[in-house]
Every structure is written in C-alpha cells, then in structure tokens.
Amino acid sequence: MLVPLAQVLHLYWLSTNVFSLIQTGTIKYVPSVRRICKIPEQKKVEQLNVEKKPVIAAVKDWWKDTRNTSKIQNRTRNDQSTFLSAGRSGIKKTYKYNPTTPHQQPTTFHAKKI
C-alpha cells in the first residue's frame, strides 16, 4: 500500500516542478505573454563596482573580520555579564569611610619633633 503512495507523491512532485519551470520560463522570456498579462518590464540592476582581490588577500580580510566579530561578541558578552552581576550583587564599597555616618575629624594634633 505504501509503494503506490510513494510513486504517486513522486509523480506529483515531478509534474508540479515541471509545470512551474515552464510557467516561469514563458512569463520571463516571452514578451507577448508579459504584455497580455500586463507584467511590467524588468528593471536592469546596476552592477556594483566591487574590487576583485586575490584569493589570499580575500581570505586574510575574511580572517580579520572574523576575529573582529569575535572580539566584539566577547566584549558584548562581558558587558552583559558585568551589568547583570552589578544588578544582582550588593553595593561595592568605593569610599574610605561610611558616608551615612558623620565623619569625625581628629580634634587633637600631635606635633612631630624635628
């Protein structure tokens, strides 16, 4: 029972693909069909002036770009982890004394003997 099903699916796939190839070819390359179906003319796309490099230079550029991309991803990951750890951890002490308590200056001065 499965063998005829596989054959039918294969026949369906083949026939739809052949039909779509014929349809695309006639619409694309037969001007009278394009006029009848009121399909506008295709616009010409300008070619970009891309500098052709030797293979070795292109591979070197690709390698530099890959390393730079990796560095940027590492920095982004580091920034995200630093940001998350700063938000989840306690306040870090960045002062010499506790600013919430009054700071007392020493009232007595001891003179040093010279």
Image: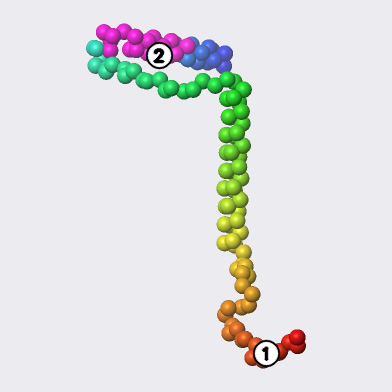
Residue 106 position in % (x across, y down): 65, 88
Kind of residue indicated by mark 1: Phe
Position in image of residue 55 (x %, y %) = 59, 20
Left or right of 8: which side holds 55?
right
* Residue sitting at x 50%, y 15%: 9
Nearer the observer, disc 2 or disc 1?
1
Say which quadrant the N terminus sits in: top right
SS type, badge 2:
helix
**Dot 1, how many residues are within 10 Å of its Cα: few (below 14), some (14-19), or many (20+)?**
few
Kindly report the distance in space between the C-alpha atoms of the residues bearing marks 2 and 1.
98 Å
Q: Quadrant of the C terminus?
A: bottom right
Is any atom of residue 1 visible in this view?
A: no
Q: Is residue 25 left or right of residue 75?
A: left
Secondary structure, magenta segment, majority class: helix
Q: Is residue 15 magenta?
A: yes
Count of all numbered marks drawn on residues in the image: 2
- What residue did someone put label 2 on? 20
- Residue at left offset 57%, top offset 38%: 69
Instruction: Name the residue tied to disc 1.
Output: 109
Residue 13 seen: yes
- Nearer-the-camera pick, 90 or 78: 78
Image: magenta residue range? 14-34
In this rendered view, identify the residue nearer to me: 65 or 112. 112
Q: Amino acid at mark 2?
A: Ser
